[in-house]
Image (tube, grey):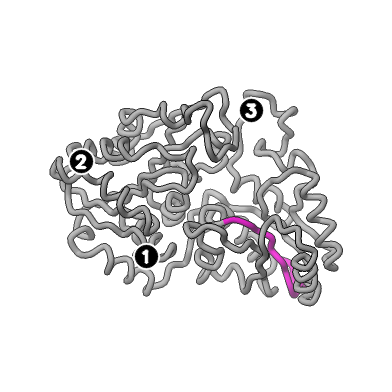
Amino acid sequence: MEKTAKRVLVYRLGSLGDMLIALPALRVVARAFPDAERRMLTNVPVNAKAPAAAAILTGTGLVDGYMRYVVGTRSVFELAKLWWQIARWRPDVLVYVAAQRGVKAAERDAAFFKLCGIRRQIGVPLTEAMQANFYGETPAEAGPDAELEPEAARLVRNLAELGDGRLDDLESWGLNLTDAEIAAADREIGPEVLATRSIAVSVGTKVQVKDWGRENWRELLGRIAVKFPGCGLMLAGAPEEAEASEFAAGDWLANGGGPVVNLCGKLTPRESAAAFARAKLFLGHDSGPMHLAAAVGTPTVTVFSGKNIPKQWWPFGPRHRVVYHRVECWGCNFEVCIEEKKKCITSITVDEVMLAVEASMTGLVVVNSE
């Protein structure tokens, strides 16, 4: 426990999923600096589907306030404003919980924060090993067959001097949902679906390469309705995903599936988490809703593209099942795939995902499909 620091600046960028992945790291910071004021330097949201950090972290007690800026700005005026905002607050410590962007970028960040007057900096990834998802090794040291590291594990590893990340403890991922948030979710779900063993599904994604295709989701949900009659269905996502979600549920209804409620655009992110906590299973892409479901302990079945390396953004823990094809171009980090026609995700069959759903619904243990 650190008792001398009065003001701690936490640097974390991103949207819904990024904040959820960082929850264990943020709890490390809170335990290390329990009496300090903790503010987060984060980005201004640029996409309507990407809620601000406050939409996730409000109520957790992990952050006391926010400083925001536009990522990638080259405006000298905007950078000077940011410098003055940080320097005037006079943080005693910087805790760096940002995604890896290369050693040179980390060095620039460290220099900027030093210019702001912050001498003590923790977690700045100034080595290749701190940047890479290889449990402390560089890619060259790890070799082609090395075990890959989840991003949440990399973040807490870089903060090891502050304490254990407790990744296996579900409380490390908790959102501290309020009674009001739970009640709001229950009102929207309604008594008919609440009375069933329900399944939550989010078919939307803001990244083209992660989109499995709504025809696949429609066929999958139709088959689930036959295999598990009487289950309710929650459709979740942003307002603009309501129509695609209704389409995906078409075969569910045609095959005699249980009651359906379309929650797209009707709940806040934290209320969505409360809704997912009511579900027996969550289905979806690699997305923020998937991380919300995992955070409240709901088992997930997720269809992943090969955009990122295996495990990096997978939901943490043994209750989750991921379908991922390790094609030769895995880890490309492309958001749009034209040349290879998204073969990493379009090659995933409904049969594969259905097998994972059956295993989750019946409590069987299966190995994640790669």
Label 3 crowding class (10 Å Cα cut-off): few <14, some 14-19, many 20+? few
Residue 251, which numbered label?
2
Q: Is residue 85 above or below residue 189?
A: below
Task: Say left or right for 180 vs 339.
Answer: left
Question: CB of mark 3 within 8 Å of CB of mark 1?
Answer: no
Which residue in the protein does label 1 denote? 267
Magenta span includes 146: no
Residue 161 visible in the picture = yes
**Residue 130 in picture, x, y percent from top left:** 73, 43
Callout 1 amino acid? Leu
Task: Tell me which amino acid carries mark 3.
Answer: Ala
Q: Disc 3 vs disc 1: which is toward the camera?
A: 1
Q: CA distance from mark 1 to mark 2?
A: 25 Å
Q: What's the magenta region?
A: 1-14
Q: For this view, does 67 lie left or right of residue 347?
A: right
Helix, strand or loop for the magenta stretch, by majority: loop
Using the image, tell me which numbered label, if any, was put on residue 146.
3
